[in-house]
Image: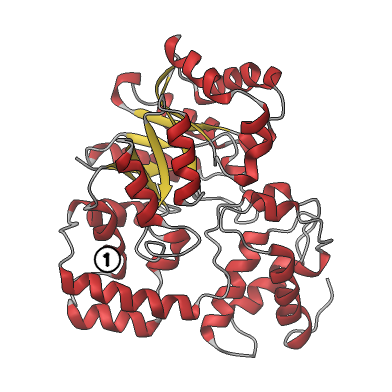
């Protein structure tokens, strides 16, 4: 039976430009609402919220609820690992950050070409298997944004893995780069439990173009845009947990309601989603899910995810004058100690970190041209 998980990647903030400045009072309310609704799986990671994600989980869940009332999944940060000696201290730090004696689910984070320095040079699989044998982990797995062929190689070589965390949503279902459907089929082939991340694709599927929303509403005016995305993932076979992120209490409440009312899609509705996917893809300029891995690696302190979000919104508006995204970009540019799009030095470190395989420096050139030259013409 599929369960709902609380993904803690995008928690509410007291300062939208400081991802460590978490609104703990609101997160506490969200946790309480989630638990009261009968759910108890929380997902975090060492790198979330610029390094304070696991500590936020401790503060809002562990310090307020008994250990047997919740489950935690977190991830070993492969991005920073290059040698064996790092593993034990990192794992101990994660246990301390999270405030638990064991993890229910523990993953190697984003096993893909972007993290091959870690998984090719360090025996990560033996390490997590050992930690499981010692009782510090209940279930071991991986998260990955790799394609189906890559996933099959991993699962063939490592039968000890019990589950995989995959990016699955109706927009990525047949995407040639992400291969959601094919990856799910590979996991089924190897009889691995599946957790789903990005069911709303970083918010894209919660705010679709008007043309797409019209088609959905004409078919069923009582169903929200978000419900279509939730219904798609909640009824897939062999899925144990659907992780949904929320940045406000209201968003979390909506997620809970949509999950509890996620009746299966019929054949006609699946056809509608194919049409909707075509419309969305034609409107998306940058296929960014706002995971922020690139932001953590940027030497120029450019909030790449934020700028891509503004750029996408600007393009969807189809306007070449001052607009909300333009004003937001201007306000961002005036903040101290931040980089703007034109500050990019094209080091390409961010490309290696991007699960969506975006050529970030090239897109930043377009962002700079749009916001800093063609329309707005301002200097930082």
Q: Can residue 165 be seen in this snapshot?
A: yes
| Residue 33 percent across, percent down from the top left | 30, 43
In the rendered image, the vertical position of residue 10 relative to residue 172, given as above or below: above
Q: Is residue 133 left or right of residue 213?
A: right
Which residue, given by chain and number where applicable, does mark 1 sit on? 228
Q: Can residue 168 be seen in this snapshot?
A: no
Q: Residue at x 23, y 79 (%)?
A: 217
Q: Is residue 161 left or right of residue 329?
A: left
Looking at this view, name the residue that lies furthest to the top.
134
User: What secondary structure is marked by label 1?
Assistant: helix
| Residue 187 percent across, percent down from the top left | 35, 42
Pick the front one: 5 or 117: 117
Q: Residue at x 58, y 43 (%)?
A: 49
Total numbered circles: 1
Q: Residue at x 42, y 42 (%)?
A: 165
Q: Quadrant of residue 79?
A: top right
- Pick the quarter of the image with the C terminus: bottom right
Residue neighbourhood size for the residue with mark 1, other residues' Cα within 10 Å, grouped as few (<14), some (14–19), many (≥20): many
| Residue 156 percent across, percent down from the top left | 43, 34
Pick the front one: 55 or 242: 242
- Pick the quarter of the image with the N terminus: top left
């Amino acid at each position: 039976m599929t369960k709902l998980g609380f993904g803690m990647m995008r928690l509410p903030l007291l300062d939208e430009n400081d991802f460590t400045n978490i609104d703990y009072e609101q997160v506490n309310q969200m946790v309480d609402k989630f638990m009261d609704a009968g759910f108890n799986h929380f997902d975090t990671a060492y790198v979330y919220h610029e390094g304070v994600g696991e500590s936020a989980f401790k503060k809002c869940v562990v310090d307020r609820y008994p250990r047997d009332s919740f489950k935690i999944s977190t991830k070993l940060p492969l991005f920073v690992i290059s040698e064996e000696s790092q593993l034990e201290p990192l794992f101990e730090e994660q246990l301390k950050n999270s405030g638990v004696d064991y993890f229910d689910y523990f993953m190697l984070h984003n096993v893909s070409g972007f993290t091959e320095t870690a998984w090719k040079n360090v025996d990560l699989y033996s390490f997590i298997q050992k930690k499981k044998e010692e009782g510090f982990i209940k279930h071991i797995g991986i998260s990955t944004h790799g394609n189906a062929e890559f996933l099959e190689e991993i699962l063939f070589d490592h039968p000890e893995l019990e589950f995989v965390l995959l990016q699955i949503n109706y927009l990525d279902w047949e995407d040639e780069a992400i291969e959601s459907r094919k990856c799910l089929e590979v996991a089924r082939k190897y009889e691995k439990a599946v957790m789903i991340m990005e069911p709303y694709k970083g918010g894209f599927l919660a705010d679709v173009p008007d043309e797409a929303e019209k088609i959905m509403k004409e078919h069923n005016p009582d169903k929200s845009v978000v419900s279509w995305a939730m219904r798609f993932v909640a009824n897939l076979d062999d899925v144990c947990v659907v992780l949904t992120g929320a940045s406000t209490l209201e968003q979390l409440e909506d997620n809970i309601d949509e999950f509890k009312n996620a009746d299966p899609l019929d054949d006609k509705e699946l056809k509608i989603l194919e049409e909707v996917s075509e419309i969305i893809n034609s409107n998306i300029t940058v296929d960014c899910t706002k995971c922020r891995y690139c932001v953590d690696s940027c030497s120029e302190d450019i909030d790449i995810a934020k700028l891509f979000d503004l750029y996408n919104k600007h393009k969807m508006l189809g306007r070449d004058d001052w607009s909300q995204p333009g004003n937001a970009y201007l306000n961002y540019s005036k903040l101290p100690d931040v980089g703007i799009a034109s500050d990019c030095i094209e080091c390409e470190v961010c490309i290696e970190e991007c699960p969506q395989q975006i050529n970030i420096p090239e897109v930043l050139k377009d962002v700079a041209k749009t916001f800093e030259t063609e329309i707005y013409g301002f200097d930082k």
